[in-house]
Amino acid sequence: MSDTDLRAFYARYIETLNAHDFARVRDFLSDDLTYFGDAVTADLIVSALTDLGNTVPDLHWEIQELSVDGGHLAVRLLNTGTPVKEWLGVAPSGASFEIVEFAVYHIRDGRFVHMTNVHDAEALRRQLAA
């Protein structure tokens, strides 16, 4: 895939996440997939995203920066939302959050084969508990 194709692929992925159409996320995932280096299934990723969407029904991802290098993507995202269920040990209070997420992906044959992401969970907890 060209850099332009990879950018369009990732934009479609984020659109799918923001539509909370988590079942369609499977279309972006390889059968041979790792998350933080561990082998995972597409079902596990879809289930985790579905649970997250149920906990934070207005969860939104916004691409801030995107870098493409061959089949690798690095992205800085702004994530926002308001949990309606307990999350990260914090009961829902109506408090919203805004955090930065950094993610790295490897794409082969038009599908993610490796995914990694990090965010400041402590900053997130502080915002929810405020």
Image (tube, helix red, strand yellow):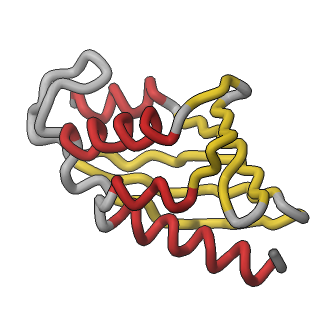
**Residue in front for this viewpoint, 115 or 110:** 110
Which quarter of the rendering shows the C terminus?
Answer: top left
**Residue in front for this viewpoint, 72 or 76:** 72
**Residue in front for this viewpoint, 72 or 119:** 72
User: Does residue 68 appear to the left or right of 114 in the view shown?
Assistant: right
Identify the residue at the far front of this view. Answer: 31
User: Measured along the vertical axis of the image, is residue 81 above or below residue 27?
Assistant: above
User: Does residue 18 appear to the left or right of 114 in the view shown?
Assistant: left
> Which x, y percent locates residue 73?
75, 58
Identify the residue at the far bottom of this view. Answer: 4
User: Does residue 71 appear to the left or right of 57 in the view shown?
Assistant: right
User: Measured along the vertical axis of the image, is residue 54 above or below residue 73?
Assistant: above
Residue 108 picture quarter? bottom right
Q: Residue at x 71, y 50 (%)?
A: 105
> Which x, y percent locates residue 25?
45, 56
User: Measured along the vertical axis of the image, is residue 35 above or below residue 97?
Assistant: above
Q: Residue at x 51, y 65 (%)?
A: 13
Which quarter of the rendering shows the N terminus?
Answer: bottom right
Q: Residue at x 77, y 51 (%)?
A: 106
Residue 71 picture quarter? bottom right
Q: How many marks?
A: 0
> Which x, y percent locates residue 107?
75, 57
**Residue in front for this viewpoint, 107 or 31:** 31
Identify the residue at the far top of this view. Answer: 89
> Which x, y percent locates residue 35?
63, 33
Q: Residue at x 66, y 39 (%)?
A: 33
